[in-house]
Amino acid sequence: MSRAAVRIIKMSHVSFDKSPRVSKVWFTVKRLDNKDDRVVALREVSIPPAAEVPTVIQILTTTFRLNSSDVIFKIRNHGGCLIPLNSSIPANSKHVPYVLEVSKIFQHVCPAPRTIPMTVMNKSMKTRLQTIDRRIQRLEELLPEIKLRRDEKLSQEIECLNQKLRFLHKRMQVADSRSWKGVLSRAPLW
């Protein structure tokens, strides 16, 4: 063959169709909402490119005849890892399908028992109340003594103020009794 013929043959394998291809994905269904752990219904699903998540969910529900109103869909690979539910799911084979888990909303959420038992809470509240009660009793016992101390302190302050007033009163009397007569009563000592 000539070189030109080889080029034509090579070019004939090139596809000029630039539209992305529909991905063909194999799924099995695990109905956890019916409390069934078996993996059933191996089917091939065609997912169009650039399809939105609701469209992908609609395709899965029609293919497997599921009611999607009150369930959650989870896709797991053969290793058990979660795969995002969108149009970019990688293609797989019939021998290694993805598992589509169908479960109820909050099906796997189990409430945990209380982390702090009520006895511990009751005990701590009792100790707090007892300490507050002891403080109140101590204040009630010291109340007459506190009143006496306050009265003593007030009487000391009043006595101190009275002494200052007497001193000032004496000084004012001394200042009023002095008058200038124009002559020194005693001769200066210089």
Image (tube, helix red, strand yellow):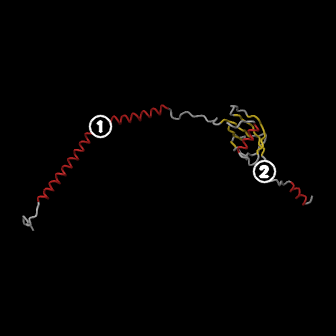
Residue 102's tag is none
Residue 53 relative to residue 167: left or right: right
At x 21%, y 49%, the residue is 161
- The residue pinned by badge 2 equals 20
Q: Bin the neighbour count of mark 2 within 10 Å (Cα to Cα): few under 14, some 14-19, many 20 and up.
A: few
Count of all numbered marks drawn on residues in the image: 2
Residue 20 relative to residue 2: left or right: left
Residue 176 relative to residue 49: left or right: left
Q: Bin the neighbour count of mark 1 within 10 Å (Cα to Cα): few under 14, some 14-19, many 20 and up.
A: few
9 in relation to 119, above or below = below
Tell me which numbered mark, 1 or 2, is placed earlier along the sequence: 2
Which type of secondary structure does the marked residue at label 2 adopt? loop
Residue 143's tag is 1
Q: Which quadrant of the structure image shows residue 131?
A: top left
Residue 1 relative to residue 67: left or right: right
> Distance from label 1 to label 2 (Cα)?
90 Å
93 in relation to 177, above or below = above
Q: Amino acid at mark 2?
A: Pro
Q: Amino acid at mark 1?
A: Leu
Q: Which quadrant of the structure image shows residue 94?
A: top right
